[in-house]
Image: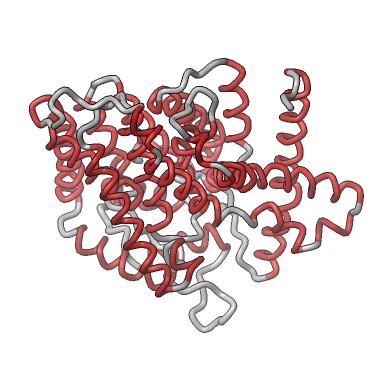
Amino acid sequence: MRLSRRSRLILLAVLAAGTSYFYFGLLLPQVRAVRTARHLYGPYSYGGDFYPVWLSSRELLASRHTPYNQETTRQIQVAVFGRALDPHNPNDPPPDYRAFSYPLYVDLLAAPCALLSFPAVQTVGSFLGPLLAVGSIVLWFYAVGIAARGGLLAIVVVLTLISYPVLEALYALQPALAVSFLLAAGMAALRSGKFAFAGVLLALAAIKPQLIVLLALALLLWSLRDWKSRKGFAAGFAGTLLVLVVSSYAVLPGWPADWWRALVEYRQYTEPPLAQLVLGKFAGGFAALLLLALAARVCWLARRETAQSSGFWLAVTIVLAVAVVLVPTGGAVYDHLVLLPGILWLFCPGADHGTHALGPIRWLGWLVLSWQWVAAAGVAVAALLWANLRHNQFAILLPLRTAAALPFVILAMLFLAALNPGANRRTQPSPDAG
């Protein structure tokens, strides 16, 4: 049964109000209370994910000190947690927690922010974060090839802004928001035939290299298939990345070794990839190899496609979803932002690439995707009626229960779509395909 336009608007308003109240009125106060009780709530908890970038960029430009040292880590912890972490306190996170672990060129790209105080950065981020999220949505609509009609676009924008990954990213001022925007802009440029510009944007998105490395490899393979017309992408990507790395080396020689040590330490205290976090080390490792093999097969076939074909975009969405499942940290739900093109490809009207043949798993996908909004609104209403519910941990965590399952369900649907002959018939191979 189709809802009327008025009914859809009312439902959307209820979900938006309920989810917002759940996150800001129930979940965050609970998190704040727990951290305060453990003496881990600092003055810059809001924006805490961007604070390491701001601080390290500020110090690098002022004195060219490496951001990968213990003193920088201590300053970050004092700002985010209110004190340095105690290695002898079993209730504290590991002593290196929140250490700077980005490549050094992130500090160079963030240099304009270093000219501001962090409270000013928080204010700017409060406006810029939602704009980046909305911009990503509009660009992904174009890139995936869906007509962004006003009503559909408005619904997707609202639901995306109140989704748990985006709310987490907005509160933390997570650089994943910038990565998502740069990815969407780069892929939109690729669809437009601006291959060199697409390569530049993808290289800039390497501020979180773990999210883009698989896509970069897939697109470089795609470039080799028709090098004469697609070499601009490879040149733009490699040239921009080279400039970033060399510029960083000029500012701080030897930084790659320091960064590598920071990554090794990061793996010691962070959560494992989502595949291992959900399935266990052995089964998760096997699943990772299987997903990589399947993604490689899809990308090998898609190398013949044009940047306007559904087969090409199916491969892109699969690679991004695989990256979410395989990269650390498994609990970094804000990295799920790169699932957006896959979700659009699967669920949006006008993007029917044979996904109607997915059967029951399509309904499972709808259930897992919509659970966060429906459950959050339900818990919010229940908490208004029964005040004691706001302190019930089971109820507070209920809307988050499907967060880990969503990437796997999206991946399953995308792989099934790739196996569907109906989807393959809609592809448009390039003239040189043989």
**Foreground: 424 or 205?**
424
Determine the image quadrant of residue 9: top right
Answer whether residue 179 is visible to the viewer in this image: no
Q: Decide if residue 405 is on the left or right side of residue 177.
A: right
Answer whether residue 141 is visible to the viewer in this image: yes
Residue 394 drawn at (x, y percent): 75, 63
Farthest residue to the bottom: give it: 88
Residue 348 drawn at (x, y percent): 53, 29
Residue 197 drawn at (x, y percent): 23, 26
Farthest residue to the top: give it: 150
Q: Residue at x 59, y 59 (%)?
A: 42
**Foreground: 119 or 289?**
289
Q: How is the image coloured?
A: secondary structure
Q: Residue at x 53, y 45 (%)?
A: 169
Farthest residue to the right: give it: 385
Give the total of numbered labels. 0
Q: Decide if residue 7 is on the left or right side of residue 113.
A: right
Q: Quadrant of the C terminus?
A: top left
Q: Residue at x 24, y 30 (%)?
A: 305
Residue 187 drawn at (x, y percent): 33, 30
Q: Quadrant of the N terminus?
A: top right
Q: Residue at x 16, y 35 (%)?
A: 223
**Foreground: 392 or 69?**
392
- Against 85, residue 347 (above or below) is above
- Against 35, residue 206 (above or below) is above
Q: Decide if residue 281 is on the left or right side of residue 402.
A: left
